[in-house]
Image (spheres, helix red, strand yellow):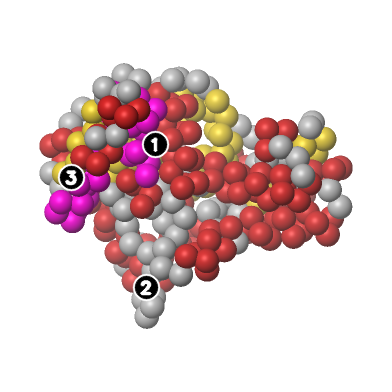
Amino acid sequence: MNKKISVIGAGNVGATTAQRLFEKNYSEIALIDIAEGIAEGKALDILQSGPILGLDNYISGSSDYNITKNSDIVVITSGIARKPGMSRDDLLKINMNIVSDVTQKSLEKSPDALILVVTNPLDAMAMQAYKVSGKKPNEVFGMAGVLDSARFTTFISQSENTSVNSISSNVLGGHGDTMVPLLNNSYIGGKSLSESINKETLDQLVERTKNGGAEIVNYLKTGSAFYAPSASIVKMVDAISTNSKIILPTTAYLQGEYGIKDLYFGVPAKLGSNGIEEIIEYDLSEYEREELKKSAEAVNETVKSMKNL
């Protein structure tokens, strides 16, 4: 695919994203990490898989942003996870500064690039990238809803013994335990979840989805998810690179949609070569609207707290 993609951060999410993009045959991929040698080594390892896979595309790694020059899309995965003894504000300040720095450095080399933010807390970090980038709102967005919806679909599939290909699920709202899985706008074989699954089971599926990331962290002990997140990133990159106009749950800047203004938040959006081309407004139940409002308030509190750091 004749697009250059830069991935900032060569940890598990970033490196696996780079590998998936390479295997999708994107013409050029740049992998950046602040730690000397990490991006270089992982990129070279991925590059050497080319002859095995029959791929002639190129990937490079460095701590120098020069290799990212003329990127079409920049994916920001840089950031740290919360450590024992670290306050929420400590984590927020560190990741806010990291996202600001990498956004500015990336755009110095690729001023026309679209920015896809993955760093947590996702909604707040997308807002931060937008503020420092000087770009249009449709050109900066975040990956969360694709992952959350995939988790919801997985759990529905397991519960109902039904192929994931027969399930269409939607999860909106902030990326965290206030997310809002939609029950009337998610379907099994064309029937809404509310019609297909009893309430007790649905409640359990919704709760497990909200805690989907934490469940994996609890198993791994010293890390967090990266296979499904990287697949979610690539799905969004593909949609933009191919100008597919596919509608995906996306962390987007809202300017009144769903009654929410001046906030990055998870909603359905049409993705194409310009980034976000249209925000789709679903008809929601009164309960879903109330839950979405609560989620927006939680995200807004995080965004407000950044101003005092």
Element marked by disc 2: loop
Number of residues whose C-alpha sits closer than 10 Å to that of mark 3, classed few (under 14), some (14–19) or many (20 or more): many
Pick whichever of labels 3 and 1 is earlier in the sequence.
Answer: 1
Of circles 3 and 2, which is in front?
A: 3
Residue matched to label 2: 83
Q: Residue furthest bottom?
A: 85
Numbered range of the magenta stretch: 16-43
Q: Quick check: 246 left or right of 293?
A: left
The x, y position of residue 184, in whole percent, is: 77, 41
Residues at marks 3 and 2 touching, judged by CB atoms closer than 8 Å? no
Q: Mark 1 and mark 2: span between their CA atoms?
A: 28 Å
Residue 40 marker: 3
- Badge 2: few (under 14), some or many (20 or more) residues near its Cα, within 10 Å? few
Q: Amino acid at mark 1?
A: Arg
Seen in the picture, residue 78 relative to 133 is either above or below; the reply is below
Whole-percent x, y for residue 77 in the image: 34, 49
The residue labelled by disc 1 is 20
Which residue ends up furthest to the front in the rendered image? 52
3 and 1 marks in contact (CB < 8 Å): no
Pick the front one: 221 or 195: 221
Which comes before the other along the chain, label 3 or label 2?
3
Is residue 257 visible from the viewing direction of this image?
Answer: yes
As helix, strand or loop, the secondary structure at mark 3 comes to: helix
Q: Residue at x 72, y 55 (%)?
A: 205
Amino acid type of the residue tagged 3 in the rendering: Glu
Other-residue count near label 1 (Cα within 10 Å), few / some / many at <14 / 14–19 / ≥20: some
Q: Is residue 262 visible?
A: no
